[in-house]
Image (cartoon, rainbow, N blue to C red):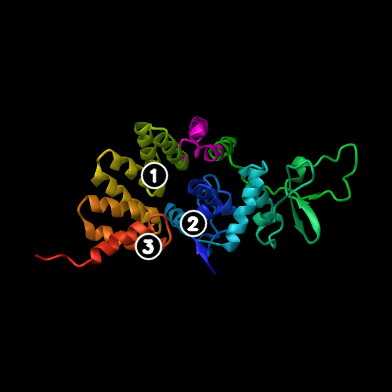
Amino acid sequence: MSTYSLLDAASILKVSPARLRNWKRTTLAHSDVQTDAASDVHLGKNDVAAGDHTPVDDRMAEKALLQSDFDFRDLVCVRAMLTLVDQGISVRRIGRAIAVLQENLPDLDDPLAALRLWGDEGGRIVVEHDGVLIEPEGQMVLDFSGEGAKENDPAPIAKPASKEAPQAHEEAMSLFERGCQLDSEPTTYNDAMVAYRKCIELDPTFADAHCNLGAVLYNAGKPAPARRCFERCLELDSRHVQAHFNLANLLEEEGCDEMAMSHYRQALRSDPFYAELHVNMALLYERLKSSSSGRDHWRRYLQLDPAGAWSEVARQRLDADKSPKRTR
């Protein structure tokens, strides 16, 4: 079965890698959309009970989760989630619905892919199970006062007792989602910055928010505050691939090539399958007069993305090295 990396999946689904990675660490960690290596671990910031895992266990599980591949079934599940988000259902509400279904219907395959909106008025999440429409959050949206339920109304199931994330964390997640929706267009850069800053106010340890804020600041022509954001992200998560990558890009522009290479190498240790990273390293090695190392990265890039945007450049670089040298 074909599998896709995080970056490939983000490209196919037309969402930012940061957004998809955050979903995988939080909402998708509660579903069955994960590899066996991480299937028993919930990695949302407030999901791991004290004493359940050691810090080393958590780091290994998170690494397995973030580097795991997506198969076609996974893409279907994420597409279902995107459909709900596009229809106005918040990510945290989807996560709660998945948790309820897993608690009450453990035999239900792919609870995320099974979720649907119901009714003309919208906003009601249901799942069909054994020929019956079930509403995981029924007690929140069904109102039986004054009249009985309609014959085809979904049947509510009780929400299990569980540890709810603090309200501030939920608000931070919503603000992060809003930032992700706004940070790709120059006309909405300022709104994205506001969302990410409010997110960080609520959760100063939200590494992805620091990284994304830095990216927006950089794209808006503000490299100095952008650098501080990337550095803060790395203080919180020393293995954050995108922060190392973005900071290395910024350092290259400032002429700090050796420092940039150091951050590229750290990003490579965390994600050796990041195709664009190999492009940047190849180009920087060429500038540093280390052509053999540059060729290694051009070859690796072609292995990872043979039809990518830089594939023709990579082949030209490698072919040039094969050309016979002219002698006098």
- Examine the rendered structure and indicate whether residue 262 appears above or below residue 186: below
Q: Name the N-terminal-most of marks 2 and 3.
A: 2
The reply, left or right, for residue 116 in relation to residue 145 is left
Q: CA distance from mark 2 to mark 3?
A: 15 Å
**Image x and y of residue 18, in percent:** 48, 46
The image quadrant that residue 228 belongs to is top left
The residue that label 1 is drawn on is 243
**Image x and y of residue 104, in percent:** 71, 55
For discs 2 and 1, the disc positioned in front in the rendered view: 2
What amino acid type should be assigned to the residue bearing mark 2? Asp
Residue name at image x 81 percent, y 50 percent:
154
Residue name at image x 29 percent, y 55 percent:
282
The residue that label 2 is drawn on is 8
The reply, left or right, for residue 237 in relation to residue 160 is left
The image quadrant that residue 298 belongs to is bottom left
The residue that label 3 is drawn on is 302
Q: Which stretch appears magenta?
A: 178-206
Q: CA distance from mark 2 to mark 1?
A: 19 Å
Q: Secondary structure at mark 2?
A: helix
Residue name at image x 76 percent, y 43 percent:
139
What amino acid type should be assigned to the residue bearing mark 1? Ala
Q: Name the N-terminal-most of marks 2 and 1.
A: 2
